[in-house]
Amino acid sequence: MTVLVTGGAGYIGSHTCVELLNAGFDIVVVDNLSNSHPEALKRVSEITNKNFSSYFIDLMDRESLDYVFKEHQIDAVIHFAGLKAVGESVQFPLKYYHENLMSTMTLCEVMESNGVRQLIFSSSATVYGVPKQVPIDENAPIGAINPYGRTKQMIEQMLHDLVLSNSNWSVVILRYFNPVGAHSSGRIGEDPSGLPNNLVPYISQVAVGKLSEVNVYGNDYDTLDGTGVRDYIHVVDLALGHLKALIKVEQTTGVSIYNLGNGRGYSVLEMIKSFQEASGRSIPYRIADRRSGDIAICYAETTKANTELQWVAEKGIEEMCSDTWRWQSMNPNGYKELVAFGQKG
């Protein structure tokens, strides 16, 4: 089976490529490198000792994308590609609507014209907006509160409509909670552009000395230690969820939606403490005011994925933090070339 992975050089995409190759799948990667680095794909090949084709093109380049489908016998598509920073989406909403919606529309049109109708879509728990209760299951009402989340919500609706128009399509929508961690080799991991938007990469950059302290937004929530609680999932567990989803799209038609999360929450201070233990470094932090729109507790109900996909998140907070630290300490500048003490490393 040959799987086209859009955004395969990105954080989640590169880890999924490793698991696909290790499981015996053939892959083809498409990535425009807007938020990723070709070095990630080189390391995927080194980790797995396998070669694969990659194309550094934009999904909205219909002609080039069609060429990829004509060159390879694609059986299914895992669609990671897209802009993903919540804060940036608030600043540049039209950019997010244009990039995320148009690229997915073009992809689906090219898939249809080439007779490929098996798709796994990378969605997000942001579609739930402010949840009315936790844990959040797949039947919870959706109502994203930022442009990034709304693009995911709109694409989900678009895929529902596509399947209604043609019952031969098989679509699995995966709603991620908070991916963290890295491959155990330390060779691939999260490499944010500029200041990290998420907690764990921010903590890891404080630990490695690139940032001075972690801002903890609010310590007066109704939680065990007063700080916000979120569902963090190891990126390798998340990647393995996509392999299970491939089995689903092969065997069924229609649309299926699954939460991929750990099924429990960790507080900000718990994450900081665990990272200190994993790294052996002190993580300075300061308490700041709550951020508008933040909620006290958010974590996933994962029973549906556990039972229907036979998938369970297995890695806990210790592995999340130790694997992140291994990646960060081995690659303090991410995939960018590091020159220190007159040597390249």
Image (tube, helix red, strand yellow):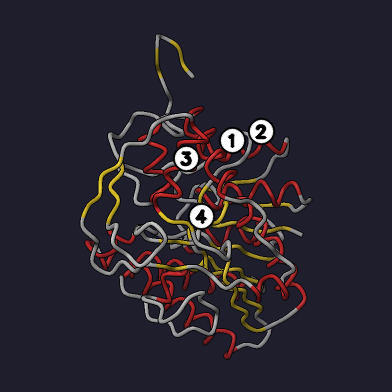
Circles 1, 4 touching at the beta carbon (< 8 Å):
no
Note whether 209 is above or below 226 in the view shown: above
Q: CA distance from mark 3 to mark 1?
A: 28 Å
| Amino acid beneath label 3 | Phe
Q: List the residue tagged with mark 3.
A: 275
Helix, strand or loop at disc 4?
strand
Name the amino acid, label 1. Lys
User: Rounded to the nearest whole Å, what is the CA distance between mark 1 and mark 4?
Assistant: 22 Å
Disc nearer the start of the sequence (3/4):
4
Residue 19 % position (x, y): 69, 50
Which numbered disc flags the more N-terminal residue, 4 or 2? Answer: 2
Residue that protrudes farthest toward the bottom in the picture: 164
Q: Amino acid at mark 4?
A: Pro
| Crowdedness near tag 1: few (<14), some (14–19) or many (≥20) residues, C-alpha within 10 Å | some
Q: Which mark is residue 46?
A: 2
Quadrant of the image for the N terminus? Answer: bottom right
| Chain-order first, disc 2 or disc 3 | 2
Q: Earlier in the sequence, mark 3 or mark 1?
A: 1
Query: Dot 3 surroundings within 10 Å: few (below 14), some, or many (20 or more)?
Result: many
Tell me whether circle 2 and circle 1 mark residues in contact (CB < 8 Å): yes
What residue lies at 70% left-to-right and 40% top-to-bottom?
51
Q: Name the image quarter holding residue 111.
A: bottom right
The CA distance from mark 3 to mark 4 is: 15 Å
Q: Classify residue 337 as left or right of residue 116.
A: left
Disc 4: which residue: 179
Give SS at disc 3.
helix
Residue neighbourhood size for the residue with mark 2, other residues' Cα within 10 Å, grouped as few (<14), some (14–19), many (≥20): few
Whether the residues at callouts 3 and 4 have beta carbons within 8 Å, the answer is no
Query: Relative to 86, is 151 above or below?
Result: below
Provide residue 210's location: percent of width, then percent of height: 33, 31
Per the image, the residue denoted by label 1 is: 42
Q: How far apart are labels 2 and 3 at the CA level? A: 28 Å
